[in-house]
Amino acid sequence: MIHFKRGLFLAFFLFGLIFVFAQEELPPTNVPGSDLLGEVNSETGRPANLEKFQEFGDHYVNQEQNKTFLYQEWTNLLANNPVMGPILFYTDQFFSFFDPLWKVIFGFEFSWSWAFFVGLFLWFGVAFVIYFPAKEMLHNKLFGFVTGFIVATITGFYDVLSTAITFFVPFIKNIWILAILIVLIILLGYLYEAFFKKLHKESDDEALKRSLEAIKSEGDVAQKALHKFSDGGGI
């Protein structure tokens, strides 16, 4: 328990340092054009005020339409939507505050876009792939989870995941292609998990078989010893 508390304290301390250094490196809010946009949110690069953001909404929509499908940010695309506009605007501000953390764990910052969720999906995919062999190595689920988390975070930290997203860009032109790709990956994941479950069951069956054989052998030895004792010391 003491080691766990120390580890938890260290984790919070490190995340605190990440936020401190990240805040020190943030660009100033007085960016070019701020006389028109007003105060600019340093995390998102958008006006800090929703009304100002929606006032220039057409500009942001046109800006996003020039981007590739995966990297189009829904917050900008739906800037003038009376319902989704405010929801995406404020949630984007909230989650973007944790960008230093996302950058460390995933290797990219938050945005309401398919690129972010594809990256997130790939991160969990890496953790999933590592989890099963790591778990079988020590027959310990916690070891599997921790190892999967560490390896996935390392791939994110060294921009492997962001590079993978860039690789998918020329092939994913719309939501249907993306959906088909995700279904195929989930199917492969299901087969991968089924393989390790079968391997685990066979390993358990083999261990049970060896245990039964050992018990039987010990029983035979005990039985022979009992007969020998009976023959030698019978009445």
Image (tube, rainbow, N blue to C red):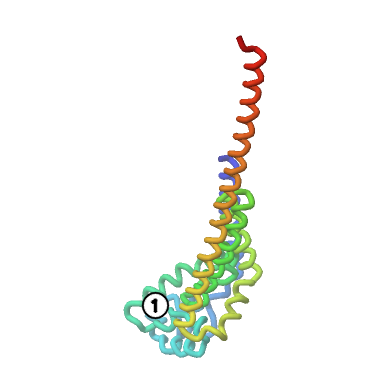
Q: Relative to residue 1, is residue 33 depicted above or below?
A: below
Within the image, what quadrant is residue 129 found in?
A: bottom right
Nearer to the camera, 139 or 152: 139
Circle 1 SS class: helix
Image coordinates of residue 40 in percent, x first then y, are 48, 77
Q: Is residue 43 visible?
A: no
Location of the N terminus (image quadrant) = top right
Q: Is residue 43 left or right of residue 232?
A: left
Q: Residue furthest left?
A: 82
Between 89 and 118, the residue placed more toward the observer is 118
User: Residue at the location (53% across, 78% down)?
Assistant: 30
For the point 57% across and 52% down, the residue is 202
Residue 146 is drawn in which quadrant? bottom right
Give the camera-side residue of 101 and 179. 179
Q: Which residue is mark 1?
A: 50
> Can residue 223 be spotted in the picture?
yes
Task: Give coordinates of residue 57: x percent, y percent.
Answer: 41, 86
Q: Is 107 positioned to the left or the right of 181 in the image? A: right
Q: Is residue 218 above or below residue 31?
A: above
**Residue 118 drawn above or below residue 208:** below
Q: Amino acid at mark 1?
A: Leu
Q: Nearer the viewer, residue 34 or 23?
A: 23
Q: Position of residue 170 (x, y in %)?
A: 57, 86
Is residue 208 positioned above or below 132 on the image? above
Give x and y (percent) for residue 72. Answer: 49, 82
Image mark count: 1
Quarter of the figure with the C terminus = top right
